[in-house]
Image (cartoon, rainbow, N blue to C red):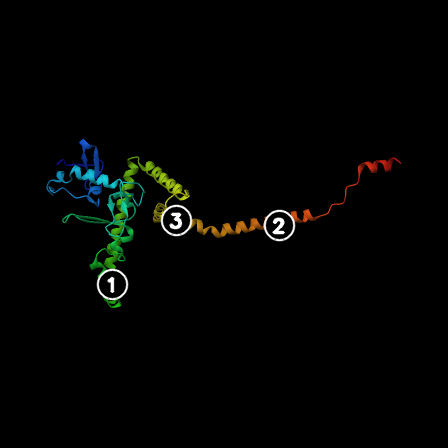
């Protein structure tokens, strides 16, 4: 069976995340190693050997996963091809791998056991508010009891907080490095153009009365999941009171004008004298 050929980006530093790619010249396919490993419906070749990474992925399996992704929309960029799904079974969020990083998704990697998982921000196990198996749910119930909470030492809490902060810091570093590389490659303008196109598409969907309820809800959710949109709404809301006062003052001025016009309308003007009769009187 045809295999993908392993290559490393010549511009990336050695060991850099995202630098390893696999290509299939005969099918004109190129894919990041992480995009392949974290795709939910993708599995490594049965012939995989850690000592020979060149036979890690079958071309046929890659094509099959690409086909599956054509009907999956990314929760971050709203484009198709989102093969990386949240590991929470009840969650239907899917991403492109690098979009998952940008959305602050949790990445779990266990190369020894071949485990590569992604959790959307809502179901990040590190938040200790969402759990994805029965054992974890039981543990959550136990942790709710005051006895267990009181027994947890300050050192354990500090270590847990430190690990959580380190995990978040690492995710931010990956995203920052990724955008810097996009800038160096001259892709930053294209990225912002795509973002504007996506926002315009969302606007069209919200303004269109024919948009289905499901699509309308998905568009609204995606906008609010984006921190930028919520920040804009917050800024608009903060200026609402000032705008209300301006409109009230404007209405007061209009009311005064209307009152004056009403007064003018009710004024009875004296009858105009007949010019012809006046002239004859003067001549006599």
Q: Residue at x 19, y 35 (%)?
A: 23
Q: What is the crowding at mark 1: few (fewer than 14 residues within 10 Å), some, or many (at least 20)?
A: few
Tag 1 residue: 141
In terms of depth relative to the viewer, which is nearer, 110 or 158? 110
Left or right: 200 as drawn, with respect to 63: right
Tag 2 residue: 256
Look at the numbered disc 3 and give the secondary structure of its residue. Answer: helix
In terms of depth relative to the viewer, which is nearer, 79 or 184? 79
Whichever of callouts 2 and 1 sits on the residue coming sooner in the sequence is: 1
Disc 2, disc 1: CB below 8 Å?
no
Look at the numbered disc 1 and give the secondary structure of its residue. Answer: helix
Residue 149 x, y percent position in the rendering: 25, 65
Give above or below for 184 relative to 246.
Answer: above
Quadrant for residue 130, please give it: bottom left
Residue 260 x, y percent position in the rendering: 65, 48
Disc marking residue 231? 3
Whole-number angstrom distance, CA of label 2 to CA of label 1? 65 Å
Whole-number angstrom distance, CA of label 3 to CA of label 1? 35 Å
Whichever of callouts 3 and 1 sits on the residue coming sooner in the sequence is: 1
Whichever of callouts 2 and 3 sits on the residue coming sooner in the sequence is: 3
């Amino acid at each position: 069976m045809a295999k993908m050929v392993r290559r490393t980006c010549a511009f990336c530093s050695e060991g850099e995340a995202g630098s390893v790619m696999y290509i299939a010249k005969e099918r004109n396919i190129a894919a990041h190693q992480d995009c392949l490993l974290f795709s939910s419906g993708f599995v490594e070749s049965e012939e995989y050997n850690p000592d020979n990474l060149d036979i890690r992925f079958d071309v046929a399996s890659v094509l099959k996963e690409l086909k599956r992704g054509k009907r999956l929309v990314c929760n971050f960029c709203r484009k198709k091809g989102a093969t990386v799904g949240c590991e929470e079974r009840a969650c239907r969020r899917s991403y492109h791998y690098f979009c998952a990083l940008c959305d602050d998704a949790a990445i779990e990697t266990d190369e020894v056991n071949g485990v590569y998982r992604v959790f959307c921000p809502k179901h990040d196990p590190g938040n200790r508010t969402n759990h994805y198996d029965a054992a974890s749910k039981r543990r959550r119930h136990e942790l709710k009891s005051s006895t267990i909470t009181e027994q947890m030492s300050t050192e354990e809490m500090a270590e847990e907080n430190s690990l959580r902060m380190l995990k978040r810091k690492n995710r931010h570093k990956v995203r920052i490095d990724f955008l810097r590389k996009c800038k160096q490659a001259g892709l930053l303008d294209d990225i912002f153009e795509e973002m504007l196109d996506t926002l315009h598409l969302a606007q069209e969907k919200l303004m269109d009365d024919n948009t289905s309820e499901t699509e309308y809800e998905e568009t609204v959710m995606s906008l609010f999941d984006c921190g930028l949109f919520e920040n804009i709404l917050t800024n608009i809301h903060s200026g609402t009171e000032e705008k209300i006062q301006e409109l009230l003052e404007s209405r007061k001025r209009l009311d005064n004008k209307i009152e004056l016009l009403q007064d003018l309308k009710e004024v009875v003007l004296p009858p105009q004298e007949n010019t012809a009769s006046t002239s004859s009187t003067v001549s006599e």
